[in-house]
Structure formats: C-alpha cells, structure tokens
Amino acid sequence: MGRIITIARGMGSGGKTIGKMLAKELDIPYYDKEIIRMASDESGINEKLFGRVDEKIKNTIFNREEIYDGELLEPDHKDFTSDRNLFNYTAKIITDIADSGKSAVIVGRCADFVLKGRKDVVKLFIYSDTETAIKNVYDRYGLDGKDAMRLIEKKDKERSEYYRHYTGRDWTDARNYNLCLDTSSMSYDKCVEIVKAYMAVLDK
C-alpha cells in the first residue's frame, strides 16, 4: 500500500526542505508547484489563473467560507474559472495522486483536509519560532529584520486564511495533523527520522 505524506508548513520553518528530504529518502515523488501545472493540464484553464490563487484567497473580508466538497464545474458553467473551482481542480489532482496507490509527498494546498479520513495519509505540520524563521528567510531570500518578518507574517496569514476558507478549520490546530514538528528545536534530519519511525510503526 502506498503512503501519502501531506505537509502544512509555516513560512521559514523548512517544511519544503523536509518534504524534499523525505521524498529522496523514501524514493517517492514530491509534489508542490507541480500540482498547479497538473491542474491546469486537467482542466484546460490557464496555469497563471491557478498561480494567482495558489495558497491565498482574494477579498478575505467579504468572502464566506467555501468548504471543499469535491464538486467540479463543467467548462460551460459561468463559474468555471472561479477561485473555488480552481481549488477543486487542485484538490482533484491531490486525490488522483493518492488514489494511484503509490506513495508521495504533497506540500500545502489543504491536502490533509482533501484526503481526510484516509488511512494511507500521514499529515504533518512543520513550524518554528520566529528567530529560526527569520534566519531561514535570510538564508533563502537575503531578507533580514523587518523585511523578513513582513514576508513571514504575510505568507502565514495567506496560508491560514486559505486553509480556513476551504476547510473551516484553524490551520495551526494540532488536531488536524498526525505529527507537529518544531524545527527550532530539532534538525531537519531528526524530523525526517521521526516521520520515518512513525510510518514504520503504522506499517507494523
């Protein structure tokens, strides 16, 4: 049986790096931005439209929650390119990956919720303290101080609002996940070891 690892992550926590390390260690595919391209290919909708609403929503003050229900609209529907339908196409790709029976790592895009109730899914939340996040943002983007903090706050706010909009849940609620790993208190290698050990217990 394949195993799907979903990763929700705070900005600057190293979640994407850990995802890539797990994929390499387990010799399984890693999906992040690839999901957007695949959703575009599946739907025929321009990839740029998916990119504009990827892990963020517009006009959050006026938007009501649109909890994901799996519905896909036909091309002749007036809301075919709506934000909700774009999300639902990305969710379809995530579901198709899981239904393939093969193992994979999937980063972001509410994958833990899209695949809720499945026994073949390991749901991770990767986070860190502010100091660690700022250091990681500096190492990756060359931003420090206030600029790094602004980017961290912006991205985490977008991801939190996106998650609540399509799931009705709090993005940082530990009850959504199987494991929550703090990269300010352990190395990426240790995080990978913990996930592998957890999966080994599940496979017994």
Image: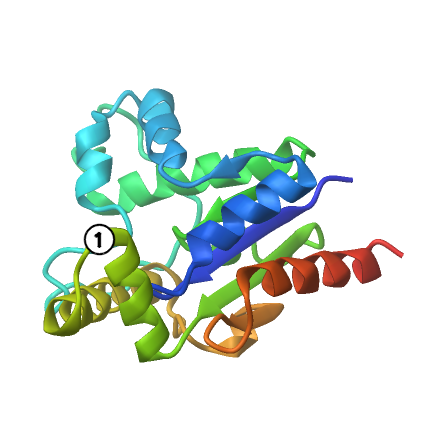
Q: Name the residue under label 1.
A: 141
Element type at mark 1 = helix
Amino acid beneath label 1:
Tyr
Residue 99 position, x and y percent, is 63, 35
Which quadrant, please, contains the C terminus?
bottom right
Of residues 73 and 98, the one nearer the viewer is 98
Residue 69 position, x and y percent, is 43, 51
How does the figure colour the protein chain or chains?
rainbow
Which quadrant, please, contains the N terminus?
top right
State which quadrant residue 10 falls in. Answer: bottom left
Residue 46 position, x and y percent, is 20, 25
**Residue 149 visible from this viewpoint:** yes
State which quadrant residue 63 falls in. Answer: bottom left
Residue 49 position, x and y percent, is 18, 34
What is the residue that sits farthest to the right in this orientation?
A: 204
Name the side, left or right, on which 96 lies relative to 41: right
Q: In this view, does 162 lie above or below 185?
A: above
